[in-house]
Image (tube, rainbow, N blue to C red):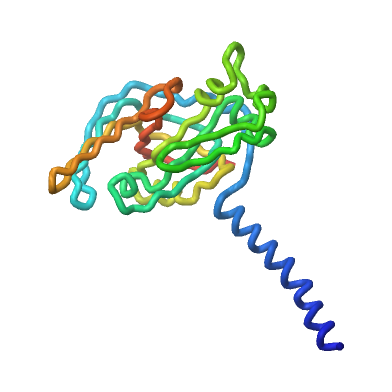
Amino acid sequence: MDYYKKQRSIFVYIIPAALVLLALFLVYKSGRRNAVAGLGEPVQTPESGHFERTVGQWKMSFDYEYAYDIEALVIHTKNYPETDIGGKLAPKDLALAWGTVAAYNKSIDFHWGQSGRWYHWYADTYEEIAPACLPGIDAETSVSIQSANTHIIAADRSVKSTISRIRRGDHVHLKGYLVNISGSAPGGKTFIWNSSTSRYDSGNGSCEVFYVTSAQILP
């Protein structure tokens, strides 16, 4: 009986401790819901430039469309396997928000998600997202023009290392270029990835293709 009580008391302590460790791991892995107020929309400046890069068997051509400077809240992240040219170029997508969407992200559950190189969201009620609505703009458009799914292409290993550490809930500052990419590989394979350059588009082609030259995770 004494042995049973001793074993039982050990489990009483071990199980809660294990659950706490599991919760901490999940928070580290996926991040947390957060809000940041006062974030302006991305700064986009016309830019021209061109460079080429070989990625495996692919010969890739990059054309600058705009210089892009964004301070944003990370509302979701998605890693993609480096098994195709898209994954090799941009193994991580960041869903980013600013304005009232970032400011109210903690009090409003937008149910953010990402899959298939898209991001998506829904709210339980329209009344719930009313605080995030811009004057004279409906709820869905307000969310759409203050958030974006972004394909992140790191310019170098240092930037790639920073990007790999970014989690949901982080406050980030990213600089670089919105780019259009074309590529070819043996066997007649071709690849085209054009960046969105508008906050008002949606659907296919509305994601930013972002060649990042500077990445910071802010306090």
Residue 143 falls in which quadrant of the image? Answer: top right
Name above or below for residue 12 compared with residue 209: below
| Place of residue 103 in the rendered image (x, y in percent of width and height, measured from the top left) | 63, 29
User: Which is more toward the observer, 4 or 211?
Assistant: 4
In the displayed image of the protein, which residue is found farthest to the right?
1
Q: Is residue 211 above or below residue 137?
A: below
Question: Which quarter shows the N terminus?
Answer: bottom right
Up-down: is 98 above or below 114?
above
Decide which of 136, 188 is in the foreground and name it: 188
| In the foreground, 219 or 206 | 206
Q: In the picture, residue 137 is in which quadrant?
A: top right
Location of residue 104 in the rendering, given as x and y in whole percent from the top left corner: 65, 30
Q: Residue at x 53, y 32 (%)?
A: 97
- Would residue 85 be found to the left or right of residue 74 on screen? left
Q: Residue 167's x, y, as percent?
A: 53, 47
Q: Quick check: 215 left or right of 134?
A: left
